[in-house]
Image: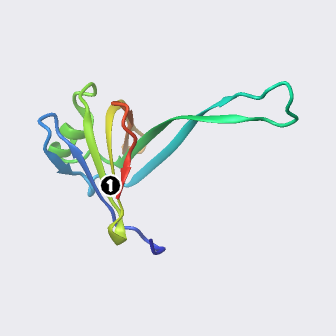
């Protein structure tokens, strides 16, 4: 993949009916944190750590300023216990797709009356994110 100074991306989140909704214009920041669990299995005969890699995990945070349009609020803010498909299309044809639960919603109004929001997600179905 080429390097980009600015990366316009397309972010789609399924609504509760399973139809993707492009929320790109409402999202200002994306936080993608992939990780793999580890287990230390060092034998008594070793002088350095031995590790096993365990299951893959992912936390994704989407955030923005102001309240999104109502069509986006329904997708991003309502029914946190419904499984969602999130797809992020990066430039140069790189795409990541994941099945997540929306685990947290924060909406803050500052003393200057500005509003910020963020939605945090976690993998939900035992399937790792798919990059293509």
- Looking at this rendering, what residue extends furthest in the front direction? 45
Q: Quadrant of residue 118?
A: top left
Identify the residue position indicated by label 1 in the image: 88
Q: Residue at x 40, y 41 (%)?
A: 128
> How far across and how far down the image is residue 40, in percent?
70, 29
Placement of 120 over or under 33, stated as above or below: above
Q: Residue at x 27, y 56 (%)?
A: 24
Q: Residue at x 41, y 43 (%)?
A: 61
Disc 1 is placed on an element classified as strand
Q: Is residue 114 visible?
A: no
Question: 55 or 111, which lies in front?
Answer: 55
> The C terminus lies in which quarter of the figure?
bottom left
> How far across and how far down the image is residue 106, in percent?
38, 33
> How far across and how far down the image is residue 111, in percent?
43, 40
Placement of 82 over or under 19, stated as above or below: above
Q: Residue at x 17, y 49 (%)?
A: 21
Left/right of residue 48 with respect to residue 37 in the rendered view = right
């Amino acid at each position: 993949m080429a390097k980009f100074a600015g990366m316009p991306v397309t972010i789609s989140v399924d609504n509760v009916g399973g139809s993707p909704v492009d929320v790109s214009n409402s999202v200002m920041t994306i936080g993608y944190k992939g990780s793999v669990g580890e287990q230390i299995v060092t034998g008594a005969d070793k002088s350095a750590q031995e590790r096993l890699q365990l299951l893959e995990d992912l936390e994704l945070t989407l955030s923005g300023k102001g309240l999104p349009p109502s069509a986006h609020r329904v997708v991003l803010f309502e029914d946190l216990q419904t499984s969602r498909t999130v797809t992020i299309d990066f430039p140069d044809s790189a795409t990541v797709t994941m099945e997540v639960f929306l685990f947290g919603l924060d909406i803050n109004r500052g003393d200057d009356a500005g509003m910020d929001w963020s939605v945090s997600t976690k993998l939900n179905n035992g399937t790792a994110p798919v990059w293509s």
